[in-house]
Every structure is written in C-alpha cells, then in structure tokens.
C-alpha cells in the first residue's frame, strides 16, 4: 500500500527546517533524514517549475519593464498570480519504502518533550496532521 504525505509547495522548506531542529535518536533520526531528503527533492521540482512559469515575466531576475522603462504593472500582476498559484500547488511525497523509519519519527514526535511556539507550533501541527492521516488510518484498516 502506498503511503504519502501531502504539503503545499510553500510548506516544503519550513517543514524540512523544522525537522532539522529536532533532537532525535536512532530510527527516528534516520526517518527524519529520509523525509528531509524527500522534501528536498520535491522542493527542487518546485523550484524548477517556479522558474519555468515565471520566466516569461522576468529578465535578469527583475520583472520586465514597459516601454517607458518602469515596471510593467500588468506583467507584474501576472507574475505574482502564477507564482502564488504554484506556491499553493500540492506536493505529494511517497514514503512507502521508508515507512518504518517515518513511523518511528512520528512516534518519537507525538510526545516531543520540548515546547513549540509561533511558526514551529503551526508546522508541528501540519506535520502531525499528515502523519496521523497515514498512520492512524492504517492502524484502523489493519484492525478490520
């Protein structure tokens, strides 16, 4: 059975950064490393896609200018729109082959001893929602 986590493109780096800050041991640490590598691969895809969709609106890293030499507002609005859309797209991470390691990561951070605040609390909640949807649903199905 395929096991996946789903994040928006804009969440990939914050989740990886959050995971990197956790103090974990053994199998949970290995699970974190595998997940960070999977997140990095998806982030590379996102960056490639982002460059591809934004290329028509930029030259030399700047928004294209109009005939008057000022930023073309219509072009800028289109660039912002396509970049916002791609940030909100879903990235699906298949971790089936690392399931045991990621389950160990999940079990290790369920009752993580340190407190989270601000953005880390939000990312923790996001990550736990994803893990719970996979691991708790699988346990329910196995019990049937």
Image: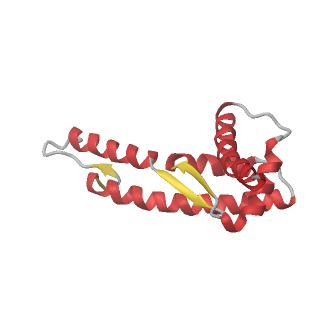
**Where does the image place residue 45, in percent across and percent down from the top left?**
48, 62
Front-most of 68 and 128?
128
Asked if residue 92 lies left or right of residue 57, the reply is right
At 71% from the left and 50% from the top, the residue drawn is 19
Residue 93: % across, % down: 58, 59
**Quadrant of the rendered image containing residue 123:** top right
Left or right of 134 in this view: 11: left
Picture layout, residue 7 above or below residue 124: below
Residue furthest bottom in the image: 97
* Residue in the picture at 23% in, 44% down: 75
Q: Residue 39 at what x, y percent from top left? A: 60, 58
Q: Nearer the viewer, residue 118 or 68?
A: 118
**Residue 72 visible in image:** no
Residue 39 in sight: yes
Quadrant (top left/top right/bottom left/bottom right) for the N terminus:
bottom right
Total count of labels: 0
Left or right, residue 58 beside residue 31 = left
């Amino acid at each position: 059975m395929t096991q996946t986590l789903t994040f928006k493109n804009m969440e990939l780096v914050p989740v990886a950064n959050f995971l990197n800050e956790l103090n974990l041991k053994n199998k949970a640490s290995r699970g974190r490393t595998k997940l960070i590598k999977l997140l990095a691969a998806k982030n590379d895809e996102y960056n490639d896609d982002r460059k591809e969709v934004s290329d028509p609106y930029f030259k030399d890293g700047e928004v294209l200018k109009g005939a008057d030499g000022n930023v073309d507002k219509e072009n800028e609005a289109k660039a912002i729109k396509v970049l916002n859309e791609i940030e909100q797209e879903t990235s699906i991470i298949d971790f089936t082959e690392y399931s045991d390691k990621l389950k160990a990561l999940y079990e290790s951070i369920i009752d993580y001893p340190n407190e989270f605040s601000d953005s880390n609390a939000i990312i923790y909640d996001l990550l736990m929602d994803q893990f719970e949807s996979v691991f708790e649903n699988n346990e329910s199905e196995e019990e049937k």
